[in-house]
Image: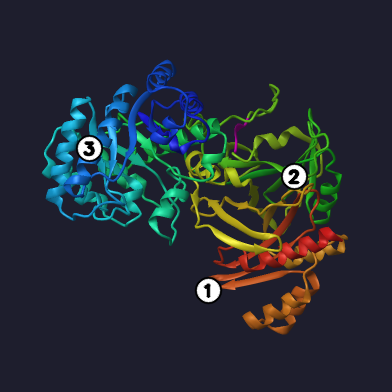
Amino acid sequence: MRTSIATVSLSGGLAEKLQACADAGFDGVEIFEPDLIAGDRSPEEIRALAARLGLTLDLYQPLRDIEGVDEATFAENLRRAGATFATAARLGIDTVLVCSNVATATVDSDDVSAAQLRRLGEVASTHGVRVAFEALAWGRFVDDYRRAWRIVELADHPSVGVCLDSFHVLSRGHDPSAIADIPGDKIFYLQLADAPALSMDVLSWSRHHRLFPGEGAFDLTTFTAHVLSTGFDGPLSLEVFNDTFRQTDPDRTAVHALRSLLWLQDKVAHHPQQSAASHLFPVADAEPAVGFDFVEVKAEDTSEVEVVLDQLGFTARGRHRTKPVSLWVAGAARVVLNEQLARDQAPHIAAVGLAVPDADATTRRAVDLMAPRAFRRTYGSEQPLGSAVAPDGSEIFWSTASADGSHPAWVDEFTDGAPADPASPVRVIDHVNLTQPWQTADEAVLFYTSVFGFSADAPTEVAGPTGLIRSQVMRTADGAVRLPLNVAPHVLSGSAPTQHVAFACTDVLGVARAARARGLPFLPVPDNYYDYVAGKFGVDASVVAELRELDLLYDRDTDGEFVHFYTRTVGNVFFEFVERRGHYDGYGADNAPVRLAAQRRDTAR
């Protein structure tokens, strides 16, 4: 289907926004009136610019506070509307958005509103313009799309139809199934936005916290399927009011926005209500990852990380035959240490490898969803890997998982190493914690959801010594891949946010004892914490003593127990070792403030 976006969703001036939309690949745009009146180009110049860029101008908006008023007020409103319609005609736009009255409505009557919309339609038609009437979620009298449709039916004018906006429908919890009762040719426009689940007034929620499809809590797939079931053939258009998107690079935001519409079309195409999907963008199918393949730590000098891995019982599997890269292995957990093109870089997580059922299928899906490719020089004798660059700059690689469970072919490119210990209590990579810049956090959720088929857990907040950390876990349904994405508070100049890799163990106490015997310095945990554990969980004194001795942390819920420890930070990365007992599925969230405070003290020392 054709795609469109409201200029209010992007930062910059109007011409800059149009260029960004065209470069991203949108078919059209909605012109937000304040963008036009703040610019120095005439409507005719904007119309010509859009034509040169290959963009249609699909909607002019918004025309506010028109219907539900007394006759004297309506006469003035008609004059104002006529000026708006004239501007739309100069732009070459044939549809104007009219919002239900919020500020001046005094007459709560469908008949009165319908009669006024009919007269509005008469004026609009003289300019070659249609009126798309939208029920705002905070409208004084009309705040439900079903009532808006009743009024449009009563108006009974060919130039008057409805605009359906997913936010105004879903934020109020209205059932979208009645959309199917609206004739498709009377749905003049469709606007789409997602949003997080928040408890606040709908106006503030709408103005500051809308998201692109796939990033929030709304069921946009079902909503859109209901609209398309009517025969609606207009564009899928985004109207997203968001403080972050209004102050970040419009070129990047436009690509991000279009990816969300491609993802949505893919979801709708697979919806049981959607019988014919030929008009929807075809996104290649790919099954989610079945596990982690590797994690890569990059630095100019990785020797300090090598020492830590050795103390933790990892085996040096060898050096790459053509690159300054080494591989360390414990169980099925693989850590790649990369010193290539890393001058002046401290140790940090640079890449994550995924094992997928079909690498070619994942690559096709990444291309369809406009994921930028990560370039790594690969020689003819080396295994090529699928790749993409995540919004935070991390590189994601993938290869087809071995059916027999053996190691991937790329491991054989590492030579002169020792065989891995078959009795290692370390099993796999449990999760990789990636710190996100504030301006890319929402984009990252969509990236992992759309390209890799991960689901997003509900966001949580963790209190640290320098502020709140917002965390949201991206994961596969079976938990084989877990990527907690953390938005950290502002850090002091010269410092960088830390990231970490967690490894799943069958015996975390054994790993801790062996590592301590090899001289590994653990992240020190304060005695107060162990008094808290004993009181909260009623843990036996001998168990608490063992936890205290090894600087281990503990958590428990109705499904099981969680025992884990952290290493000290090397550069910007540290390691965590976890043992999940029973069916425990969390991450010891209550222990995070303890860890953050301990790391701050350790760094200060």
Most extreme residue toward the front, as rendered? 72
The answer to if 551 sits in the magenta stretch is no
Mark 1, other Cα within 10 Å: few <14 / some 14–19 / many ≥20? few
Which tag is nearer the camera, tag 1 or tag 3? 3
Residue ID for mark 2: 348
Q: Amino acid at mark 1?
A: Thr
Please, what is the dominant secondary structure of the magenta stretch? strand
Q: Quadrant of residue 200?
A: bottom left
Horizontal and vertical percent position of residue 533 = 68, 78
Q: CA distance from mark 3 to mark 2?
A: 62 Å
Report the span colored magenta.
Answer: 385-390
Among the two numbered marks 1 and 3 on one chain, the one whose residue lies closer to the N terminus: 3
Mark 2, other Cα within 10 Å: few <14 / some 14–19 / many ≥20? many
Label 3 element class: helix
Q: Residue at x 77, y 61 (%)?
A: 599
Residue ID for mark 1: 558
Horizontal and vertical percent position of residue 575 = 74, 55
Among the two numbered marks 3 and 2 on one chain, the one whose residue lies closer to the N terminus: 3
Residue ID for mark 3: 78
Image quadrant where one finds the N terminus: top left
Horizontal and vertical percent position of residue 18 = 46, 26
Label 1 element class: loop
Horizontal and vertical percent position of residue 48 = 40, 17
Relative to 305, does residue 566 appear above or below in the rendering? Answer: below
Q: Nearer the viewer, residue 246 or 416?
A: 246
Label 2 element class: strand
